[in-house]
Amino acid sequence: MSVSDRSSPGANGLLRLYIAGDAPGARRALANRLRIMEELAGEVEIQVVDVLAHPDEAERTGILATPTLSDESTTPPRRLIGDISNIAQVLDYFGYRKKDSGYDHS
């Protein structure tokens, strides 16, 4: 399956990161969120949804595990569950490319 290349100008995206409170996995996911946003230099916004504070949001979107990084602009939503520390894989999965890094998207 191919994901469209979002590296073109004006192709800003919105992802959601679902976490559960202040657990160690949530803290790692939040740190990785910052790394992803820095790597993409403003091409993507990643909203954070704490499912403990907003269980209705988790139920509405069908989130059963955290952390989950979700692109809900696609049908069905594209989701990565668990560790998102491999930034290259995350970018590849969601169809983004690193800026000025020589990242091979193949």
Image (cartoon, helix red, strand yellow):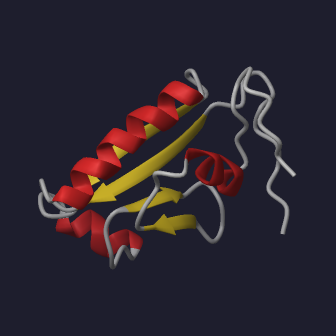
Q: Position of residue 71 (x, y in %)?
A: 55, 55
Pick the front one: 74 or 25: 25
Pick the front one: 10 or 97: 97
Image: 2 above or below 98 = below
Specify whether 49 is left or right of 8: left
Q: Is residue 50 visible?
A: no
Specify whether 80 is left or right of 59: right
Pick the front one: 48 or 38: 38
Q: Going 39% across and 33% down the picture, which residue do you hit?
A: 34
Q: Position of residue 90 (x, y in %)?
A: 59, 52
Q: Going 42% across and 50% down the picture, which residue do you hit?
A: 16
Specify whether 97 is left or right of 79: right
Q: How many marks?
A: 0
Image: 72 above or below 99 = below
Residue 46 lies in quadrant: top left
Which image quadrant: the N terminus?
Answer: bottom right
Specify whether 5 is left or right of 20: right
Residue 104 lies in quadrant: top right
Image: 86 above or below 44 = below
Q: Going 67% across and 57% down the picture, which residue do you hit?
A: 93
Q: Going 64% across and 46% down the picture, which residue do you hit?
A: 88
